[in-house]
Amino acid sequence: MAGYIEDRWLKKRPNKETGKRERTALWGKSTRYRVKGIPGVRDRSFDTVADAKAWLAETQTDARRGEFIDVRDGVISLREYVEKHWWPSQVHPAQTLESMRYRIWGQVLPHLGDLALRDIGVAELRKWSADVQRTVASNTAYVAWVYLKAVMQAAVEDKRLYRNPCKGNTSIRPPKKPERKARSWGQDRVDGARVALSERYRIALDLGVGCGLRQGEVFGFSPRDVHGDYLHVERQILTYKSRLYFGPPKGGKERDVPLPTAVAKRLLTHQERFKPIDVTLPWLDPEEPDLLRENRRTVTIPLLVYTGRGGAINRTTWNTKAWKPALAAVGVIQPLPKRQPGEKPSRVWEPSREHGFHILRHIVSA
């Protein structure tokens, strides 16, 4: 069986004259016994021959089964493992990578990054979970937990850990996924929200309710996407690192959706009032998330929904200045407090994630 123990303090062969093994230059200067010769396993040194024999026997068995884990590989810090080994291997759309980076570098590494992988146990995870849940929203904490668990699982599969400490420990209270049951709006609320939107943005609600388009797909919609009684959805407007891009629909999947007659009529009416405007943006290819903006190919699309200045719409700005006021107008959220003399106007709306633009797709489903 492969593997043997080397005595580093004594030479292998005895002196021919005395019959005794002579001391080496390492006598008393290093650990004495080194286990060597196991394929795929780094050498390891021990002070006593008993420890060396025990480790040799255990390692030979694990190596034969393909289950050997070198605990020394777990000495690497979580931060170093993430930055040098885990993160470079992640292949996702640019927006997903941006979200992952925000959660991992924002909620995970500041708390656990300096710890060695093998030192992250139940106690450390309990404290991390409690600290994070006190400082960020429940959904943010939950997503951070999901990513942390994925990182630790990768470390297990990389043979740096025996097991994932995020799994199977009942004493850890991980962040819970918020329960949000999407409730379809009634027609009165839909009509009220439409009226509350400015005239140029009402068609956005029509496309959301009537055709089930996502918000980014509405902002990236062009009249040339109309093909008789259906729409071909082939692009959306994305925000990546605070800049706008054209990109493929969610999941990279183009699709055709029915175009109801009522929506088709409203599209024609809208175009009479707001002519489509050509907008040029870089194309965000999911397969090249790190490509610099200036090196990306540009695409020019005649957009139907655009800002008052004739530009593509930033969803964050639109949600704050158009969608949230419409929600307040129909009683979904509280209106902003009235500004007192000398005060700056507030733009901090109450959270309304469950009533985001996506709610319109549930109206279609209903």
Image (cartoon, rainbow, N blue to C red):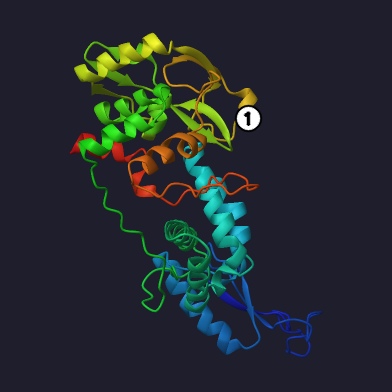
* 10 up-or-down from 164: above or below: below
Q: Residue at x 76, y 84 (%)?
A: 15
Residue 215 to residue 150: above or below: above
Q: Is residue 91 visible?
A: no
Image quadrant in which you'd find residue 323: top left
Count of numbered circles on the image: 1
Please give the name of the residue rendered at 24% of the width and 17% of the height, measured from the top-left corner.
230
Residue 338 point in image, percent of width and height: 51, 47
Is 323 positioned to the left or the right of 114 in the image?
left
* Residue at far left of view: 366
- Quadrant where the C terminus is found in the figure: top left
Question: Crowdedness of circle 1 by 10 Å Cα count: few (<14), some, many (20+)?
Answer: few
Q: Position of residue 182 (x, y in %)?
A: 27, 48
Residue lying furthest right: 25
- Which element carries disc 1, helix, strand or loop? loop
Kindly identify which residue carries mark 1: 292
**Residue 309 against residue 153 in the figure, above or below:** above
**Residue kind at label 1, given as amino acid type:** Leu
Q: Is residue 336 left or right of residue 354?
A: right
- Picture layout, residue 137 above or below residue 91: below
Q: In the image, residue 86 lies at what x, y percent?
A: 54, 53
Camera-side residue: 161 or 252? 252
Horizontal side, residue 212 vs residue 107: left or right: left
Q: Position of residue 98 (x, y in %)?
A: 53, 43
Return the residue nearer the eye: 346 or 318.
Answer: 346
Q: Residue at x 27, y 31 (%)?
A: 209
Q: Is residue 142 visible?
A: yes
Judged left or right of residue 175, residue 186 is: left
**In the image, what residue occupies the spot 52% across and 21% down?**
308
Q: Nearer the viewer, residue 113 or 21?
A: 113
Q: Among all residues in the image, which is located at the extreme front?
A: 341
